[in-house]
Amino acid sequence: PAAAGFLGPPPRSLPPSSSSSSSSPARNLMTLARRPHRLGGFASASSATTTRLFSSSFDDDGDDEPPPRSAADPTLTSIKSPTVKRFKSLASKRKKRSALNLTVVEGLRLVLDGLSSPPTRKLFRHVVVAEGALRHPELGGRLREELGRLAREGQSDDDDGDNGGVRVSWGTDEVVRACGETVTSQGVIAEVSIPPPYSGPPAADDDGGRGGGGGGGGGGGRMYLLLDALSDPGNVGTLLRSSLASGVEAVVLLPGCCDVYNPKSVRSAMGAALRVPILSATSWEDALEALEGWGVNTKERVWAATMEGSEVSSSSSSSSGRGGGDDDGMAAAEAAAAAGARP
């Protein structure tokens, strides 16, 4: 197969050409490989070409220069390019994220974790990489492997790459940094689709789907977390990460909560925002109605917690918890009490 070279050890750098002519074999190969922007277009490249693109071409000590590039390379060099403007807009504007149903994921670990998990891998649409990211002492090798996997998957795409291939662009360090909002860029950023909203627990014989898995069958065996007026992205991200770790079936966001797909929330949640099913409710009453539709007894199995809460006795098998706001407690505390929620 064309990408068989990915399975072997990375090759050493090609020796420098004895001629500066633009028709040298190395330059021709690089031109061929980098012609399309979508990885699906690499299907026609040879094994050596693809391996040279995505395998390490640096010496073990990292002192060698990156492979030469031709004028045909699709390297992004301007921070005013449409790609940079699109990424920047998604990173900074909630309305843009909502309109396009897209967000951005920044950083080596978050991008790699997302690509290595099948449920989140299918959300990826466009990755922008700086060549320096391939030199990362711990994660550079994984990045090369994931880019190689994308290339292999792209080989089954149509020539125009319009049937789902992930687009990959190379950019300068300055370009990748301009695409996002982190102070210190790690040289890789990705555009990903926002997962569909949670629509209820799966059928008894269906274990698939995104995240969740609170255990047991029916609403009584699942745990849901409701967040009310939590406006700090860091706090919300921490709760999403905890929800993933504790097997929460879904998180319900009440009015006043921050955008969980804000890049800061995504970073704080360490990618959990793409894995934990999430639903936004317009009111506490709508949230209760949804819980009841999922089989939760909202008169007996809902607990509420605020920063001002007092100690309460334990209750058996509660299946829904509700967290209050960052500063003012729960804006709908009376509604919760009227609905029978435990304080």
Image (tube, rainbow, N blue to C red):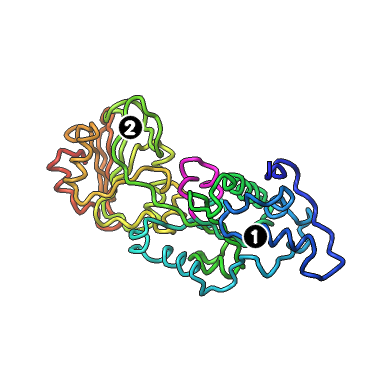
Give the mark nearer the N terminus: 2 vs 1.
1
> Residue at (66%, 61%) from the top-left corner?
131
Q: Main secondary structure of the magenta part?
A: helix
Place of residue 161 in the rendered image (x, y in percent of width and height, measured from the top left): 52, 53
Whether residue 300 is visible, yes or no, is yes
Q: Is residue 123 magenta?
A: yes
Which of the numbered marks, if any, corresponds to residue 44?
none
> Residue at (29%, 55%) from the top-left corner?
257
Circle 2 sits in a helix, a strand or a loop, which is it?
loop
Q: Which residue is mark 1?
A: 34
Q: CA distance from mark 2 to mark 1?
A: 43 Å
The image quadrant of residue 133 is bottom right
Name the amino acid, label 2.
Pro
Place of residue 96 in the rendered image (x, y in percent of width and height, measured from the top left): 36, 63
Which span of residues is magenta-colored?
A: 112-125
**Location of the N terminus (image quadrant):** top right
Q: Are marks 2 and 1 in contact (CB under 8 Å)?
A: no
> Residue at (78%, 66%) from the top-left corner?
23
Name the amino acid, label 1.
Arg
**Location of the C terminus (image quadrant):** top left
Looking at the rendered image, the disc whose residue lies closer to the viewer, 2 or 1, is 1
Where 335 sits versus 302, above or below?
Answer: below
Q: Is residue 273 magenta?
A: no
Of residue 258 and residue 163, the one placed in the foreground of this image is 163
Q: Which residue is mark 2?
A: 202
> Residue at (80%, 64%) from the top-left corner?
24
Place of residue 160 in the rendered image (x, y in percent of width and height, measured from the top left): 53, 55
Q: Dot 1, how many residues are within 10 Å of its Cα: few (below 14), some (14-19), or many (20+)?
A: many
Where 45 sits versus 248, above or below?
Answer: below
Q: Dot 2, how many residues are within 10 Å of its Cα: few (below 14), some (14-19), or many (20+)?
A: some
